[in-house]
Amino acid sequence: MEEYQNHGEISLAHYGVLFLDELPEFEKSTLEVLRGPLEDKIVTIARVNASLTYPCNFMFVASMNPCPCGFYGSKERKCNCTPQAISRYMGKISGPILDRIDIQVEVTPVKYQKLEKNVKPESSEEIKKRVNKARKIQQNRYSKYGIFSNSELTPNLVEEYCKLDDKSKKLLQNAFETLGLTARAYERIRKVARTIADLDEKENIEVKHIAEAISYRSLDRKYWNN
Amino acid sequence: MKIEIIEIKKEDKNYPLELLKIKKPPEKLYAIGNIGLLYKQKIFGIVGSRNCSEYGRKVAYTFASELSKDDITIVSGMAIGIDTSAHIGAIDKKGKTIAVLGGGFNKIYPESNEWLFHKILSLEGLVISEYAPNVDANTRNFPERNRIISGLSNGILVVEAEYRSGSTITANFANSQNKKVYAIPSNIYSSQGIGTNALIRKGAILVTEPSDIKNDIFKNTNSRRKKSKIKNNEENFENSFNQNDNLNLNNKDLSELNLINNFSLDNQIYSNQEIPKEYLEIYGLLKGGVMYINEIASKTKKSISELNSILTIMEIEGYIKRLASNQFEINKI
């Protein structure tokens, strides 16, 4: 009976962070398994004798290169990958998985000299303060619902707390038409915008918040909408 | 989807005349889709290497979509790379496009482009091949089918070609068929541009804008041909000077005007008076070329999150384009 107590990585990450480095290097089937748990926050493991369900409310974080050689899109180095190789690499991550990743950020390669003399960045300590403040706002706001953060909002609560003004609605509409986002992204963009507004300590979501949230879905459209 | 294959023999009345003029016309053509396209007046071929750069893909797309707007049918080979971008460019502007395959219809090559095959057909395009439906696509056949691409076209544009690639073969066919060959110049360090640059050296016409092609062969072609060569050249020279002056002026004015106009369209977020001045500042910066978001941030002294928001709105409004790795450039289309 002992084997039943063996939790997988997903449920070990309950209330924590699951970090996958070099995401496309994982087996495609392994990645697809994540879809259910990411959505439902529970994982069901079926064995011969029993089927067990564990909780797994985790934050999913992953990193990857833009292409097998790592230089696609770089101004300084030439990328040697063929278009097929790039699409095969990116294709490891299916659209549905990508849809469930709310924030996708591409980082720019930085030259060494620039690292040193660039403007002083915000320290992690300051960032932590800001983040905690935003978390507090969310906890207070949702105290009666038994949830902690914007990511846990149900569709009904999204309607209530992520209201958009006319300009934002228009922007989001245009974004779907011109940038080719998927419909599934709609609610998630609103949740992210809510978080950005919280960080900004604003009561309502404004155009700039929605715009920033849209910018965090760059992978969605670049590689998968050919 | 039920697909009906139409066979056209060389002796048939509906065999396209243009193809009879070439060396070794195909004995039989297999066609699926809108065969009316074969008899169109304005047909233009866009070809290039399969292993192309982002630059080449963009050029192929832009030229195909711009030419399609003028009711010019785009022919290409439905291979990956430049060909695919050319077909998509035409499709996106609801233009017509013809794909000439190097194999039979049941053996679409590459398989990953089957969606394109269906897309072309669903939008009243045409797919033809000189091979029977069950013949395997063989890369050896590709140079052969290129003679059909150039044969059908009034002229062809080679977007990117490596040294001795299939596209330069197409250019040779076109040349021997007395069709005009245009080429896009490439960075001299890029291996994908060696063939095209060599074509230009050999006399292919260098083009940098879709209007170069439109003005050259899709206007007054007949009347010009009759004139003597020298006179023709002189006139061309003069004309090109005058035209260019006008063009440059117009383009400049347009782009500046556009900046204001675009924002004031009905479906835009900001009305004319409201255009924040940082938009103009960023637009001005990007005029200097492609920039990373970090560079824009250090020049404008704005935070990345603020910039993300501004750049996204500018992108949605159609002003700028986001490239890989958070780079941005002015949207020229």
Image (cartoon, coloured by chain):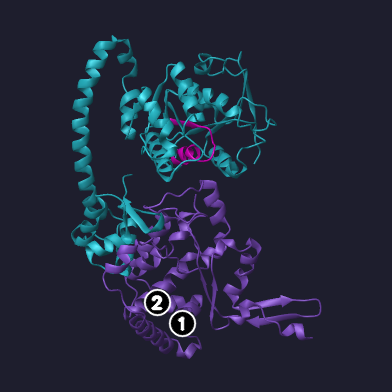
Chain colours: A purple, B cyan
Depth check: A2 or A211 in front?
Answer: A2
Kindly identify the residue that appears in the image at 50 percent across and 75 percent down.
Answer: A155
Comparing B53 with B234, the one in front is: B53
Using the image, tell me which numbered label, if any, was put on residue B312. none
Q: What stretch is highlighted in magenta?
A: B72-91
Q: Which image quarter: residue B279?
A: bottom left
At a point 22% along the width and 61% down the height, the residue shown is B278
Residue B110 or residue B194, whichever sits in front: B194
A18 shown above or below B329: below
In the rendered image, residue B82 lying in the magenta stretch gets the answer yes
Amino acid type assigned to the residue bearing label 1 in the image: Ser
Task: Tell me the residue that label 2 is attached to.
Answer: A195
Q: In the figure, is residue B196 to the left or right of A43?
A: left
Circle 1: element type: loop
| Amino acid at dot 2 | Thr
Label 1 crowding class (10 Å Cα cut-off): few <14, some 14-19, many 20+?
some
Q: Position of residue A123 (x, y in %)?
A: 33, 79
Q: Decide if residue A207 is on the left or right side of residue B251.
A: right
Report if the CB atoms under discs 1 and 2 are less than 8 Å apart.
yes
Crowd class of label 2 (few under 14; some 14 to 19; many from 20; radius 10 Å): many
Of the two numbered discs 1 and 2 on the same chain, state the one appearing first in sequence. Answer: 1
The residue labelled by disc 1 is: A149
Chain for numbered disc 1: A
The reply to whether the magenta stretch includes residue B326 is no
Residue A57: percent from left, percent from top: 57, 80
Q: Name which quarter of the figure residue A176 lies in.
A: bottom left
